[in-house]
Amino acid sequence: MLPVSILLIGCSEFSETEEEVIRSGRLYNEAIAAEFHDTFVDYWNNTVSGNLDKAVEDYNDEAMENISNTYMFFGDNLLSDMYVDEQEKKAKALEYISDSFRESYEKTINLLKSQIGTKGLTATAQSLNEILESIEKGENEWIFNEDETSLPAQLGLIIAHPKYGFGPENVSNVYEYKFENVPWQFYYMNSANKGSSDDCVYAALKLMQQWMNAEQGKDISVVYCAPYEDSFNSYLVGYSNHRSFLITFLRNDDKKCSYEWQEMEYESSYVGNTLLD
């Protein structure tokens, strides 16, 4: 009986394929994807949105003062009415650009999150690097990709105008595109004059590119892997980037590793508790 007992003790909770899913496969990719998504949602809420609102507020204050001065000096006439009309058009343009940028930003982070989850961070970063390199060379061929499921094709559908392509004016690294110093108000006001949110979208893509390239140098590991309640095939898995998931291995086919997962709240009290070898 002793050899049998030793054999049972040595058995792993997971198959090699299941362990790979957790350590370096799909669930690992989803941990990075979740961090990417949360980072850029927080950045929008804490920085970008406020800058756009401040730009509109400043414009409205300036416009009201200019309109008041116009009526004061020129009276209520056709010239004054034309000036007021121009100010109203600019206000509508600002609203349109804000909505357009917000929609592109949201769709882009969702797309890149999906790409990181399914294809991994390295492959996604490489593809985005190639797209931005084409944009910076003034090329638009990247949009017309035969594979409709590829990142270039899907991103092109989000950010590129079907007739004019994607043509941001500011493609230099003057501001180095760091989170803390992107001049969002400047890009936003300039975009309203152009009638396109391309400058804003490009700045966002550069930040996403830098985040991905920097993240590849980090070592993310499993810090806990514990059974979920009384289940025999569900586990809580936490990663060192403070992302956690509930994964359920279906285990109904010996030849195929099937599983489902959902993101959970990270529990620091579980750290160190692991069923992995």
Image: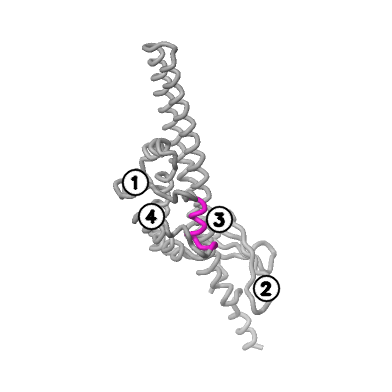
- Mark 2 or mark 1, which is nearer the start of the sequence? 1
Whole-Å distance between the Cαs marked 3 and 1?
43 Å
Q: Position of residue 247 (x, y in %)?
A: 62, 64
Q: Which mark is residue 251?
A: 2
Image vertical order of residue 92 relative to residue 273, above or below: above
Image vertical order of residue 78 relative to residue 26, above or below: above
What's the residue type where badge 4 is placed? Ile
The residue pinned by badge 1 equals 170
State the residue at coordinates (53%, 53%). 110
Asked whether disc 4 touches disc 1, contact meaning CB atoms under 8 Å apart, the reply is: no
Of residues 249 and 76, the one nearer the viewer is 76
- The residues colored magenta run 148-159
Whole-Å distance between the Cαs marked 4 and 2?
46 Å
What's the residue type where badge 2 is placed? Arg
Specify whether residue 154 is painted magenta.
yes
Q: Which mark is residue 267?
A: 3
- Asked if residue 108 lies left or right of residue 264, the reply is left
Image vertical order of residue 101 relative to residue 148, above or below: above
